[in-house]
Amino acid sequence: MQLANRLDQLPPYLFLEISRKIAEKRAQGMDVISFGIGDPDIPTPEHILTALKTTSDDPPNHRYPESDGLPEMRQAIARWYTRRFDIELGDKEIVPLIGAKEGIGHMALCLIDPGDIALVPDPAYPVYSVGTMFAGGTSYMMPLLEENAFHPDLSLIPEDVARKAKVLWFNYPNNPTGALATPELFEEVVAFAKEYDIAVCHDACYSEVTFDGYVAPSFLQTPGAMDVGIEFHSLSKTYNMTGWRIGMAVGNQQLIDALVRVKSNLDSGIPQAVQYMGIEALDNTTPQWLAANNEVYRKRRDRVVDVLTAIGLQVNRPKSGFYIWARCPDGWTSAQLATELLDKHAVVVTPGRGYGEAGEGYIRLSLTTPDERVDEGLRRLEGWRLPDAPAG
Ligand code: PLP
C-alpha cells in the first residue's frame, strides 16, 4: 500500500515530544497542568443546549442537512453581522461551516491549483498552509514580527510572488500573538489584493473574545473588502462551543459560491439540530453573558501575565483571544523552555516554533484552563528563577 506524497509533506509534528513527555509524567503519577490547547473549559450556555435538546427530537433534523445550511441559520448570521458590524449581507454571501477549520481547509481547494502560491502569516494557525499544501500549492510565509505589531509587511513580498499568489490569509485578533488589526492594515490588504488580483481570507474567530473595552472590527467593514474577500468566524470561542462544530464564512459572493460548491461535493453540512444551537447562540446570547464569559479570561490573563512578568519573561497583555505570547529569554529556544517548564514544574505550554519559523523564540499559554488549575500552575512558577540557557 502506498500513501499519497502529500502526507509526507505534512509539517513535522513538533508537539510529539511534548505529548510523549506529558504521557510519561502522568504515568509517573505527576499532576500535569496544561496551558496548551485553546479549548474553552466553560460549558456551552444552557439556552443553547436547550435548542439542541428540543430540535433533536424533530425527525426532519435527523436527515441530511444541506451543505449551504438552513436558510434560518443564514438569516441568523446575517442578523448578527448587521447588529455586530453594521454590515448587510445577502443570502448568497453567507455559508455556515462545520467549524471555521473545515471552511479554511476547503477554501484552499477553491483558490489553489498545483503550483500556485498562497500568502500565509508566520506564526499562524497551521490550517492555512496545510490546506494550501493539500491543494498542491506553496505557502509564501509573511513573518509577523513584534517590531511590526505582528502585522505582515506587504511591501516585503517580492513582485513575482505577489503576481503568482492566489490568496492572502490573515487573522485578527491574532492567534497566537494576540495582536490586533488596524483600519490601515485592512485598507492596505484591500489595495494589495486589488493590485495583484488576489482573494483575501480573513479569519476573525476571536473577534468576540475581547477585554478592556476593545471591540474588534470586521475586515468586511473596510471599503472594497467585499470585492476581494471573505471572513471566517467561529461559534467555538465565543459561545464555548468547540465540540459542536459550527462556524461561518461570509463576504464576496463568488468566493462563497466556490466554497459551497466544494463543500457540497465533500461534506453534507452541519447537523440541523446543531444549526438550531447556532441560531439560538447568535440571536439570543445576551451581551451580559458574553461580558461575564470574557471576564473569566480577562482575570486569568492578568494573573498569568503578572506571574510570567515577575519571573522575568517579556509578555504581552492581549486585548483579545485566549493566548499569552511570551518571549523566551535569550539563549532559550521555544522547545527548550517548554521542556524546562514541563520537566521542572509539570506545566505544559506550546513552543512558538509549532506555529511557524517566526514563532521561534516565543511560547504560547492558553487561558482555557479552569481557574483553580491556572492558580496551581502559577503557584508552581511563582518565585522560580530560570536557570542559565542550555548549551547549544
Ligand atoms: N482559526 C483560528 C485562528 C483558530 O485558532 C481556530 C481554533 O483554534 C480555528 C480557526 C478553528 O475554529 P473552529 O473551532 O471553528 O474550527
Image (cartoon, helix red, strand yellow):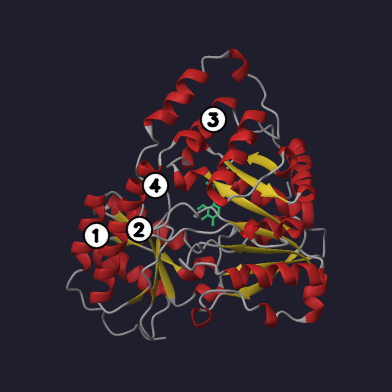
Name the kind of residue labelled 3 in the image.
Val
Name the kind of residue labelled 1 in the image.
Gly
Numbered tag placed on residue 325 in the rendering? none
Across and down, in percent, residue 239 comes to 44, 42
Distance CA(mark 1)–CA(mark 3): 35 Å
Distance CA(mark 3)–CA(mark 4): 18 Å
Q: How many marks?
A: 4
Numbered tag placed on residue 377 in the rendering? 1
Apparent side of residue 146 relative to residue 171 in the rendered image (left or right) = left
Number of other residues with Cα within 10 Å of mark 1, as a class: few under 14, some 14 to 19, many 20 or more = many
> Of circles 1 and 3, which is in front?
3
Numbered tag placed on residue 35 in the rendering? 2
Residue 70 appears in the rendering: no
- Which residue occupies 18% across, 63% down? 379
**Mark sitting earlier along the chain (1/3):** 3
Q: List the residue tagged with mark 4.
A: 40
Across and down, in percent, residue 322 comes to 40, 57
Name the kind of residue labelled 4 in the image.
Pro
**Mark sitting earlier along the chain (1/2):** 2
Q: List the residue tagged with mark 3.
A: 274
Q: Quadrant of residue 153?
A: bottom right
**Mark sitting earlier along the chain (3/4):** 4
**Mark sitting earlier along the chain (3/2):** 2
Name the kind of residue labelled 2 in the image.
Phe
Residues marked 3 and 4 touching at CB (< 8 Å) = no
Q: Quadrant of residue 90?
A: top right
Residue 176 appears in the rendering: yes
